[in-house]
Image (cartoon, grey):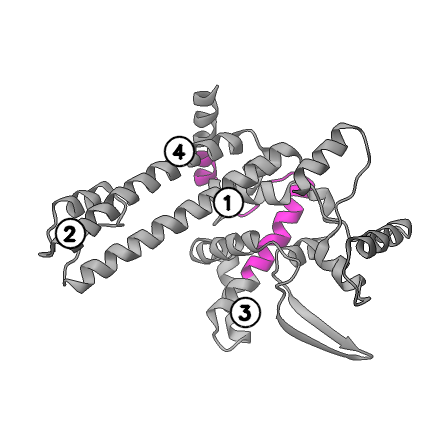
Amino acid sequence: MWITTFDAFERAGVSIKLANSYKMALINRTGKKTDKVDAEKIAQVLRMGSIPECYVPSAHTRGIRNMVRQHVRLVQARARVVNQVHNLLDAHGRAVHATNMYSQKALSCLDSLSLGDAQDDFVLRQCARRIRHYTGEITEIDRQLEAEAAQNEDAKLLASMTGIGIYTAILLAAEISEISRFGTPKQMISWAGLCPTVRQSGKEMRLGRIKKMDTDSLVNWAMCEAANVAVKHDARMRAAYEAARRRHAGKHMLGIVVVAHKMVTIMWHMLKNRTPYESRNEDLYRRKLARLEKRRRSKA
């Protein structure tokens, strides 16, 4: 509901701030919870200039974010159907030999496959139709996101980093929106949820689990996925991963978080200085840019 109100005030030229409800709840611990008390508390904090404010991107950036999140939902929905198909095939001791279950080869096999049970055959055909539908929707939204990435300079810069494809680049560009809102790399790392929680009392300081509250979970997931790819194809990131594993008793996920942490730091400098990744695969980067240029021309 805040979007309609925020946009209306913005169009009218009224200065407006969007308060962070989680942080406001920490400030307002009076025991009372009414609209009047909330309004009074917000007004007091605003007068002091200490309102915990949420960043609000432009309407266009919010639209890209919605497309990115729709892409995630579609991929997750397709994955659930694919898992259902695997369960059906396993129950009947059958298998489909294909690189992935949503390829044309796999779907053709599902269309002609008989499990020997009329009800399960019906469910299998329905699953195949749903996989086709989701794949078509994902392909369509991929084209739209590529067209947006072709016009987004931040996405083009981010795509130069090993492990970051076009989809991840536009996801990160949309979620970051403006690099100026992060004064230091540490602020961006904290926002991405790639640093430990800190508890300090006097001279004693303890580092806890990775931060979860007040972070962008989508960026956290995307960076961990990118780190998994980077450690396989980037010698620099591979060295950081191996060093982290030696420090943490060979734990894979801790090594990936360390690499993702390092990648976010590099990304901050890339966006601040407007320079591509120094250790990039130049040939791969040129192919990515050529693909984006082709998509831009087709949309034009």
Residue 153 in the image: state x and y as whole percent: 59, 33
**Region in magenta:** 259-288
Q: Quadrant of the N terminus?
A: top right
Type of amino acid at the residue the image marks with label 4: Glu
What is the spatial separation of the Cα atoms under label 2 and label 3, in whole angstroms? 49 Å
Mark in the foreground, 2 or 1: 2
Q: Secondary structure at mark 4?
A: helix
What is the spatial separation of the Cα atoms under label 1 and label 3, in whole angstroms? 31 Å
> Dot 1 surroundings within 10 Å: few (below 14), some, or many (20 or more)?
few
Residue 115 in the image: state x and y as whole percent: 12, 55
* Image point (53%, 48%), residue name: 279
**How many marks on residues?**
4
Dot 4 corresponds to which residue? 140
Q: Which mark is residue 69?
A: 1
Dot 2 corresponds to which residue? 121
| Labels 2 and 3: the sequence-earlier one | 2
Residue at the farthest top position: 300
Type of amino acid at the residue the image marks with label 2: Asp
Dot 3 corresponds to which residue? 244
